[in-house]
Amino acid sequence: MKKCLLISALAISMNTMANTAPVEFQLIPTIMEKFDHAELYQKKSATLGRLPLASEIGQDFPTYVSDSKGGYTVETRNKMTNDVVVASMLKPIVKDVYNQWLVPKSTWQKTYGVLPTSSEFKSFKRIKTIKAIKIDDELLSLLGSEDGETAVIAVSWDDNGMKVYKGGYLADYEYGIAPEEMKSNYELVK
């Protein structure tokens, strides 16, 4: 009997893990077709950027986003390397907690034009536009959402994927933009 319960629990656990695996949305034709008619957006706010500190190399680097309840939650976790720029929003999510993320240097240069030259944050204006589609019930279903509010997409920088949110946006590269971030930091290109 104990063996049956253990096998059942293991099967349920494995099934749950399989269902929550990050989804590579670029492989879903219905989603990719939506980008054919997607609107263009450009970041309206500046982004802070800096080079990593020597003491940060090899360390865990969490990216925090708003939890829509006045707090914050971990969106992704990465390892700091010499090949990235640390990007940051200007304003904190709460108190001293900022939305910061790692950007490969080659991507940063294409997006902002020039690389930071020091480990102190400096302001950069985005020069590149993105195509983005709103995350609605249909998109969440295509992404395998289990709660109808969120889904996890595959990203190159975190094996656990990135959580995306209903009302947020899916960008044509490989990331999601939370609803609050989109509203505060992006504008429609006319």
Image (cartoon, rainbow, N blue to C red):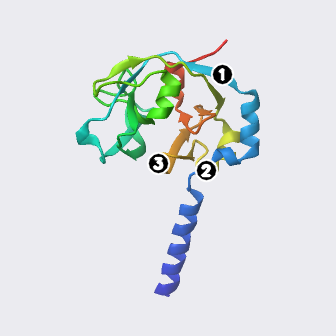
Q: Is residue 3 above or below residue 71?
A: below
Identified by mark 1, the residue type is Leu
Near-viewer residue (28 or 116): 116
Q: Is residue 106 above or below residue 46?
A: below
Label annotation for residue 158: 3
Query: Mark 3 and mark 1 in contact (Cβ < 8 Å)?
Result: no
Relative to residue 84, is residue 56 drawn left or right? Answer: left
The reply to whether residue 83 is in sight is yes
List the residue tagged with mark 1. Answer: 40
Marks 3 and 2, how far apart at CA: 12 Å
User: Would you identify the image quadrant in which residue 129 lies?
Assistant: top right
Identified by mark 2, the residue type is Val
Label annotation for residue 23: 2
Near-viewer residue (48 or 71): 48
Near-viewer residue (4 or 96): 96
Q: Earlier in the sequence, mark 1 or mark 2?
A: 2
Identified by mark 3, the residue type is Asp
Q: Report crowding for label 3: few under 14, some 14 to 19, many 20 or more residues within 10 A (C-alpha).
A: some
SS at mark 3 in the image: strand
Query: Mark 2 and mark 3 in contact (Cβ < 8 Å)?
Result: no
Q: Earlier in the sequence, mark 1 or mark 3?
A: 1
Relative to residue 170, is residue 185 drawn left or right? Answer: left
Residue found at x 66% / y 21%: 40
Q: Report crowding for label 1: few under 14, some 14 to 19, many 20 or more residues within 10 A (C-alpha).
A: some
Query: Mark 2 and mark 1 in contact (Cβ < 8 Å)?
Result: no
Q: Position of residue 116 (x, y in %)?
A: 37, 24
SS at mark 1 in the image: strand
